[in-house]
Every structure is written in C-alpha cells, then in structure tokens.
Amino acid sequence: MSQTVIRMQDVNRSYQMGENTVHALRGISFSIDQGEFVSIMGPSGSGKSTCMNMIGCLDRPTSGIVEIGGKQTAKMTEKELAVLRNKTIGFVFQQYHLLSSLNVLENVMLPLRYQGIERHKRADLAKEALALVGLEDRINHRPHELSGGQKQRVAIARAMVTKPQIILADEPTGALDSKTGLAVMQLFKEINASGTTIVIVTHDSGIGASTKRCIRILDGKIQSDGENHV
C-alpha cells in the first residue's frame, strides 16, 4: 500500500489586499502518494501557485489541513518547517535560481550544507546527482557558461541531491525551448521511475498532459483530478 506524502483537506487560503479579501484557495482537497507523477495545472490567478506554496511549506492555510510527509504544517514552527522543506522536498524553479558566484558542483552541494554534511561527502553526493542528469563534465563551470537546459538540469540535480521524498517543480520548462523542455520532462520521468514523487505546477496543457495525473485548478477550486494515459 502506497504511503500518502501530500494531503490537503478542505484547505482555504485568503489574503487581505487593502480593504479586499482575496480567496486564493477555496476548500481544496486531494492527496498524493509516494511515487506519483502529478501536475497541478491552471491559468494565472487560478490558485496553483498558492497550492504550490502549501506543498512547499512556504505558506500556511487560513483553514483546513495540509500534511507533508505525515506532518501538519499549520502546527509547526518556522524552524521546523525549514527542516521539513530541506529534508523532504527538492525545489526546481523556472528561473533556476543558481548562484552565479558558485560553480556547478558548489551549487548542487548547497542544500547538503544546511543538513550539516561534511564537505567531502557533500562533493561526492553532488557529483552523483550531476552524473544522473548528464552533467558530470560541467562541474567546474559557472552558471553563465551553461545553456538554459543545462542550468535546469543543474537545478534538478540540486533538488535531487538530498534524496527528497518529493520534487516540487514550478514551471520547470517555462524558460526553455520546446525540444529542451521535452528533454527536461523525460528526465523527470526517469527520476520518478526510481520512486521519487514529482509534482509539477504549470499553466501549460502539454506539460499537464505528459504527467500520469493532472489536477486542474480554477478560481481556487479543483475543476478535475484524473489520470492521464501517457
């Protein structure tokens, strides 16, 4: 029986914008099991980014339950949330967020530093992750020396290096050409095949259709949640 790694139950999230209340999420409920490959899809303003922030422990619900790795995030301190993020979730962003002052190897090593792992061990684990994404020959390059696709593969290696339960990707192909985007999606499929849960947040229907399951959100509510035939 699969373990549930993400659970959202009757989640509401509202924000105060001056005198107006913005309801970003309106009673959303779903769960994702270990090893699933899921996209959360919707247009700008649909609530998908707020949903991503809940999964990534970057925000808390106004009401309802958010559980990540079996832990209710609303009951955790900021320090506890930071530890949960670092140990459970690997993040991949549209704009890569690589540090220009560090080389490829050092960028991938960074999350391990926050776990207190010794430097030589960090380097070994980072080299392993870079080999998995086919960039073992670029470890001494700086981000400005890489193509967009290579930068995104470095970002994926950085997300993988802590061996997280979940990889959470925000529009990971948005800054890439279509051919490179397909290569990145293939890499996600390979990572998922090894048992890592992958959640991709996107507005792109092509990306939504290429995952095994797609949750569609509109106006803060789930419109549909079903399996894709891929």
Image (cartoon, grey):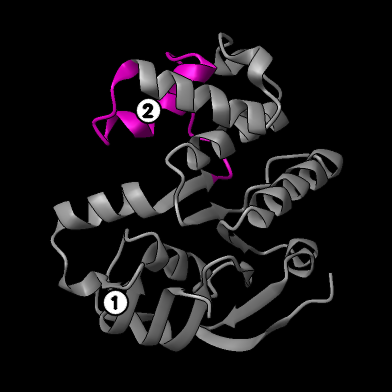
Tell me what residue is drawn at x 42 percent, y 25 percent.
109
Q: Is residue 209 visible?
A: yes
Tell me what residue is drawn at x 56 percent, y 31 percent.
129
Badge 2: how crowded within 10 Å, few (<14), some, or many (20+)? some
Above or below: residue 217 compared with residue 125: below
Q: Which three-letter amino acid code belongs to the residue tagged 2?
A: Leu
Q: Is residue 76 left or right of residue 24?
A: left
Above or below: residue 132 compared with residue 209: above
Which dot marks residue 167?
A: none
Secondary element at tag 2: helix
Q: Which three-letter amino acid code belongs to the residue tagged 1?
A: Pro
Image coordinates of residue 164 in percent, x first then y, are 44, 50
Question: Along the polypeptide, which appears first: circle 1 or circle 2?
Answer: 1
Q: Which residue is mark 1?
A: 61
Segment tinted magenta in the rendering:
93-119
Number of the front mark, 1 or 2 = 2
Image coordinates of residue 10 in percent, x first then y, are 37, 91
Image coordinates of residue 139 in percent, x first then y, are 57, 14
Magenta run includes residue 147? no
Q: Which residue is mark 2?
A: 110
Tell me what residue is drawn at x 63 percent, y 35 percent.
152
| Furthest residue toward front | 1
Secondary element at tag 1: loop
Tell me what residue is drawn at x 46 percent, y 64 percent.
52
Image coordinates of residue 206 in percent, x first then y, are 80, 63
Nearer the observer, 16 or 154 = 154
Disc 1 to disc 2, C-alpha distance: 29 Å
Q: Quadrant of residue 154?
A: top right
